[in-house]
Amino acid sequence: QVQLVESGGGLVQAGGSLRLSCAVSGRSTFSFSAMGWYRQAPGKQRELVATITSGGSTNYADSVKGRFTISRDNAKNTVNLQMNSLKAEDTGVYYCGAKLKQWREYDYWGQGTQVTVSS
C-alpha cells in the first residue's frame, strides 16, 4: 500500500524559509514517473508548485522559480521542497503527489501540510 506523508509546514515570517518533506512508503520514489508538490490557498484551486521526474528533470511554477527547489533523497525515500524568500502569497496547504505514468493524473496524494507566511 502506497502512502505519502507530508511534514515540515508551519508559520514563518515573510522572507523566511521552510523545508517540506514527503515521505513515501510502499514504493520507491524512483518507481513513479513523476512526483510533485501542489498547493491550495483558501478559496482557490489547487495549483502546481514543482515537479520532478524519475529522470531528475524539474519544473516550477513561475511564481516560485528561483525561490523553491524540489529534490529527492534516495536514502530516505522522500521528495523535498526547499522554500526560501517566502511571501504571504505562498500561504496554503501543500500537497505531495505521485503518478505512475507521465500522461496520467496523479495516482497518490498525501494529506497536506499547512504553510502560513505572515507579512
Image: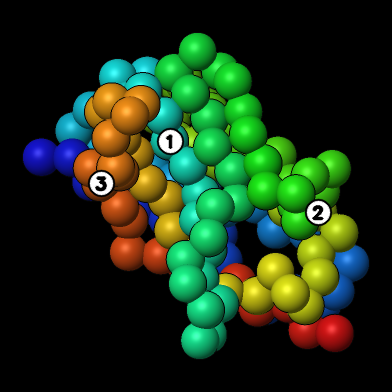
Q: Which mark is residue 54?
A: none
Residue type for callout 3:
Tyr
Q: Residues within 10 Å of mark 1 (few under 14, many from 20)?
A: many
Of label 1 and label 2, which has the lower sequence position? 1
Q: Position of residue 47 (x, y in %)?
A: 53, 60
Check disc 3 and report the residue beneath it.
108
Placement of 89 over or under 1, stated as above or below: below
Residue type for callout 2:
Asn
Placement of 19 over or under 55, stated as above or below: below
Front in this rendered view, residue 95 or 105: 105
Q: Position of residue 27 (x, y in %)?
A: 23, 28
Q: Secondary structure at mark 2?
A: loop
Placement of 46 over or under 5, stated as above or below: below
Q: Are marks 1 and 3 in contact (CB under 8 Å)?
A: no
Q: Residues within 10 Å of mark 3 (few under 14, many from 20)?
A: some
Q: Position of residue 101 (x, y in %)?
A: 28, 25
Given the current orientation, which residue lies at the most extreme top position? 55
Question: Which residue is pictured at 10% across the width and 40% down the height?
Answer: 1
Question: Which residue is pictured at 37% across the width and 46% down the height?
Answer: 97
Of label 1 and label 3, which has the lower sequence position? 1
Left or right: where 9 falls relative to 95: right
Left or right: where 54 falls relative to 59: left
Q: Examine the rendering and report whether any part of residue 23 can be seen.
A: yes
Left or right: where 88 falls relative to 111: right
Q: Secondary structure at mark 1?
A: strand
Q: Which mark is residue 84?
A: 2
Residue type for callout 1:
Met
Check disc 1 and report the residue beneath it.
35
Q: Quadrant of residue 17?
A: bottom right
| Quarter of the C terminus within the rendering | bottom right
Gap between marks 1 and 3, in whole Å? 9 Å
Name the colouring of the figure.
rainbow
